[in-house]
Structure formats: C-alpha cells, structure tokens
Image (cartoon, rainbow, N blue to C red):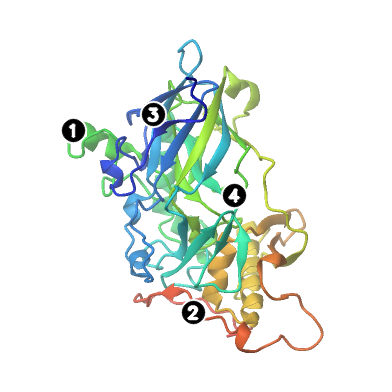
Amino acid sequence: MAHYGAKVVVPIDLKKKPWEQKHPLHNRWHPDIPVVAEVKDGEVFRVEMVDFSGGGITSDYSAEDVKHADQSIVHYLSGPIRVVDKNETPAMPGDLLAVEICNLGPLPGDEWGYTATFDRENGGGFLTDHFPCATKAIWYFEGIYAYSPHIPGVRFPGLTHPGIIGTAPSMELLNIWNEREREVEENGHKSLKLCEVLHSRPLANLPSTKGCHLGKIKKGTAEWEKIAKEAARTIPGRENGGNCDIKNLSRGSKIYLPVFVEGANLSTGDMHFSQGDGEVSFCGAIEMSGFLELKCEIIRGGMKEYLTPMGPTPLHVNPIFEIGPVEPRFSEWLVFEGISVDESGRQHFLDASVAYKRAVLNAIDYLSKFGYSKEQVYLLLSCCPCEGRISGIVDAPNAVATLAIPTAIFDQDIRPKAGKVPIGPRLVRKPDVLRCSYDGNLPTTKNPAASM
C-alpha cells in the first residue's frame, strides 16, 4: 500500500529531555555536528521539536523559571538533516537549498505556549532598562486562535512559524563569526554609542562549553571538548539563516538557504505560535513545541547565481525568503510612530533602533490607558501579529519607525475619540502577568513625560 503524507525523520517525545531523544538535539552551530537523518530532494518530511528551552520554562503560574532560565542552553534544535538529490548526490557548498514549509503547528496534546521577559541580569530584552523584572504569560490555543488568562480581553489568530531554520556553517565561516562577534563583545562598550540607549547584555554570546549539546557527540569526550569551544551560539541570525525570527514564514513559505557544507546539514527549532515584528521582549513570541513538514530542492550553483556577497569573502551572503499565501486578515490598524530621539531627549542620527524603541514605548504607554499594565502590553506587542516598519531612513537627522497594531484583537475600541478614555470594572484587566522582583542594582530608564 502506498504511503501518503510526510515521513517523520526527527520525532520528539515530550517526556524526555532534549539529549535523551531518539535523535539527540543540539544547541550550537558547527560543521562537525553529526547528521541525524537524510532526506531526498522533493521528499516531504516531518521534523518535530521542543520549545527553545527544552522544557525548562513550564506552564506553571510562576515566573521563577524565567528569572532563573539557563541562557547557556538556548536554543535546542532538531537536526542536522543531510539533503541529497534523487541520484543520492548531496547538496554541495555553493548550492542553494530551497526549503518549502508545507505544514506546521504545535505538537498534538501540547497546545499551549508562553511569552516572557528575562530578568535584566539574565538576558534582558529590547526594553530591559524600562522592564528589568522577569515576567511570563501563558497562552492556550483554540485551533488557530490564542488567548491568555494573564492578558485578558485579547484573542488573535497565530501566524505560526519557526524562529530558527538554517544550514551548518563551514569552518571558514564559523571562524569569521567568532572573530567578529568577539570583537563586538570585547570592545563594543567603548566604540558603539548605541550601547548607551539599548541595554541588552552581553553584546554577543561567544562559544562556551557551558550548556553545550552537540547531538550524538558524547559530552566530555575529546571530540566534544574541541567542538564545544569552537561552536557558535544559536542566538543571532547569520549568513546561514538561523535565528531570523521572521514571523511571516508560515505555511507555503520558502527559504532559500546558502549551502556551506556537504549535505547542507539543515536544522530547525524555536517554534512560535505567533510573534510581533521585532520579538521585542526577547523571550517574546508565543514559544511552543511544534512540528514542521518540509520539502527541499537543491539549486546547483545557486549561491553564485542568486546571492551577492556583501563582505570580503564569497561566504558573506544572506538567505532569501518567500512569504507564503496563508496569513490572518486584518483591515484596521492603529499605528505608532517613533523617531531617533531617546528618552532623555537626545538626538541620534538616522538610528532605526532608537526610533523603533520609541515607537514601542509610545504604544505601551498608550495601551496602558485602557486597563492594562505596561508589562501586559510589552508582552502582547512582542507576540501578537503587529507590524513593524522602517518608514523613513533618509531624512536626516531622524529615522522614522512605526508599529502597527491590529485593532480587532481587542474586545474594546482602542481608538482615540472625543471625551476621556473609558474606565470601569470591565477595563481593569486582572490578573496581571506573572512576575518576579528585580534584585539587581542597575538604574531603570524613566520617560519623565510618560504616564505612570
């Protein structure tokens, strides 16, 4: 009898730890992490994955797990998966790997997720100088919709997607990553003026043996020790794709990934039920376990044909993304603007990061007038299907960024209108997000003119 549907190549047992899985997971990028499966060009296959924390952050109504989260284990990935053509010839360096997302979703029986902010001393986030405490909201799924008892009065359809999908780097590319990121981490505080406005630390996460998992390679062996000291963290997106957090990469999307090693060695993880542009709270999508059903096509010589290096070597390329046809439809939006002037009133020159920070802060302060705490709004803007834009980048001295929020996700009218903002028991949103105290001594940034 013929088999129809996707072949499961990486199964997940949620009762087991990431390293106990049939195909042990990994949380680093390195060309020598062993493959766990092989797929053919044109074959539809299924990859299952744990949430990025590997179950470390739970559905308990407490934020203690977020406050004390082990940042050294981020992110657990399923793979690597070797890709070959119909003649068994593997993808080769210089090829382009077209990866189509045929289907995706939460793992059956595990239909819940979480959004959080890390403690400022343990990961932080985009607005960590304003919100230094660890917080968490639990979300439950009703088909395509998500709701949270911690952010009441809000319900929206999720645009589900993988936060991470990428190919393995070559050793040459890995060395490029480590060299440039070490320079930023060691010297960036002195040379980068943006550090005075954006307070996420460290500036780069360098290779570390702490928390390192390399799939099939046994921890503590000489091979593990060597690779663990070289392997790149999975936190930023890079030339291989990786942690790009593009919220629109849902059903029907295609990712065109450069191939740097034989077989491509595709890995994926960090599944999101929904996310806002920027994922501003850092642990900021609706994080969940999940699955992808994928189909690959090898485009021979595609890197040279389609990707233009933006750097000193042919390896300095970036993937191309093709957005699929399936997205929620919203017709009405409230749009918040930010310009490149920081909270102290200081002018920055065409700085889109400062402008986006201002747009998010403007939206948080506005929505807090409708019965929400600012912590609730911060988490909501990180995970709801809001749209971030760089609206202006040429009109010196101000960059202009905007954040558009679909008004239909709220159970009340949030538009400005004549008269005062409505108040009443229905608009007092209880309970609030789960939170912990901030026990550090770093100063909190205040916007003197904002509401309390």
Distance CA(mark 2)–CA(mark 3) = 50 Å
Task: Give amino acid for label 4.
Answer: Lys
- Binning the other alpha carbons within 10 Å of mark 3 as few (below 14), some (14 to 19) or many (20 upward) gives some
Query: Where is mark 4, residue-wise?
Result: 247
User: Considering only vertical position in the picture, is 24 above or below 1?
Assistant: below
Q: Secondary structure at mark 2?
A: loop
Q: Quadrant of residue 372?
A: bottom right
Q: Position of residue 32 (x, y in %)?
A: 33, 28
In this rendering, position of residue 443 left or right of residue 420: left
Distance CA(mark 3)–CA(mark 4) = 30 Å
Q: Quadrant of residue 310?
A: top right
Q: Nearer the viewer, mark 1 or mark 3?
A: 1
Q: Nearer the viewer, mark 2 or mark 1?
A: 2
Q: Which mark is residue 431?
A: 2
Query: Where is mark 3, residue-wise?
Result: 171
Give me the residue at 43% from left, 49% from top: 289
Mark 3 or mark 4: name the one nearer the start of the chain: 3
Q: Secondary structure at mark 4?
A: loop
Task: Give amino acid for label 2.
Answer: Pro
Distance CA(mark 1)–CA(mark 3) = 18 Å
